[in-house]
Image (tube, rainbow, N blue to C red):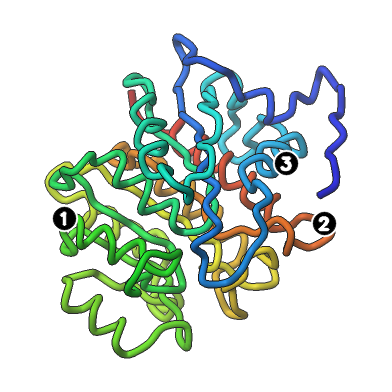
Amino acid sequence: MGHVVPTHDSLWPSAASLITPAPVVGLRNVGLLGVSTYSSSLTPRSWHSTPSAIREALERYSTWSYGDGVDLAREVALIDYGDVFDPNGLGGRERVHEAVAKFDSSLDARIILGGDNAATWLTLAGLANGDFSNFGLITLDAHHDLRDGESNGSPVRQLLDAGLDGAHVVQVGIADFSNSAMYAARARDAGITVLSRSDLRARSLDSVLAQALDVAGEGGRRIYVDIDMDVADLSVVPGCPAAAPGGLSADELRQAARYLASDPRVDTIDITEIDVERDSADQRTVRLAALLVLEVLAGVRRRSR
């Protein structure tokens, strides 16, 4: 991956300047943690750290949100909690649980950088610590992720088996020819709300996401959002092994991240399924992921205090 050369322009602070080691008084504080899972992936992938690549890509962008007329640096801090060492390895689950337990209680939200989708299971299980009664889940994903076993194709099934209530799970963007009749039936039997790619064509993005938030967050539940990058069109995420033509545009995905993060019930958002070694020469997948981090921060900033 090519190194990003900083601008060194004092009038154009880069988004990487938002990263700080500790919460900042008076700002919205959002935690950042890398959970770079890869070894249990159904599609063989490289071990290279996606979290590190995304942090580096933040150098490409500024802190200024033109649409909101806001400098994020004046309102939001990104607290870096580092990376979990070998989260798929022996003792990896315990290391992830220990890492999420270190999140400061004052955080407004948390961002998890995968890794493949196994990061979703490991992180949400760590946050719940055995009690899923106050959690809901929204996945932006082309796939149900309800396979048997333990892989990046099974995190939703593993969470259901661990106690997450399917009535508070919403899957947005489920795609044609990316699943099976058996897994569709498994989702239906679990009570999962499925809002497919077809639903996104027929309805506004905001209306679909509002429904997802209401279902996942019913009763004031904490909402965990999984942004699996294969929900996007292959042309914008070449570094995502399972992406296909016809997915969400980069702009739709960015809008979704900001919209969801603006809801105070959203507790944690992960960004998963990027293999930096498969990415294009212009790093478009990693660069989109970095923009999603900024969209999440812009969404959190919109929350009323």
What secondary structure is found at the residue carrying circle 2?
loop
Q: Residue 210: x, y in percent? A: 31, 56
Provide the residue designation for mark 2. Answer: 282
Type of amino acid at the residue the image marks with label 3: Ala
Taking 103 as reference, is 125 left or right? left
* Residue ID at (38%, 70%): 145
* Residue ID at (61%, 42%): 51
What secondary structure is found at the residue carrying circle 3?
helix
Which corner quadrant of the image does residue 220 belong to? top left
> Quadrant of the image for the C terminus?
top left
Q: CA distance from mark 1 to mark 3?
A: 37 Å
User: On screen, 40 above or below 113?
Assistant: below
How packed mark 2 is, by other alpha carbons closer than 10 Å (few <14, some 14-19, many 20 or more), is few
Q: Residue 295: x, y in percent? A: 55, 43
Provide the residue designation for mark 3. Answer: 57
Which label's residue is closer to the chain start, 1 or 3?
Answer: 3
How packed mark 3 is, by other alpha carbons closer than 10 Å (few <14, some 14-19, many 20 or more), is many
Type of amino acid at the residue the image marks with label 2: Asp
Provide the residue designation for mark 1. Answer: 163
Q: Residue 49: x, y in percent? A: 65, 46
* Residue ID at (49%, 62%): 40
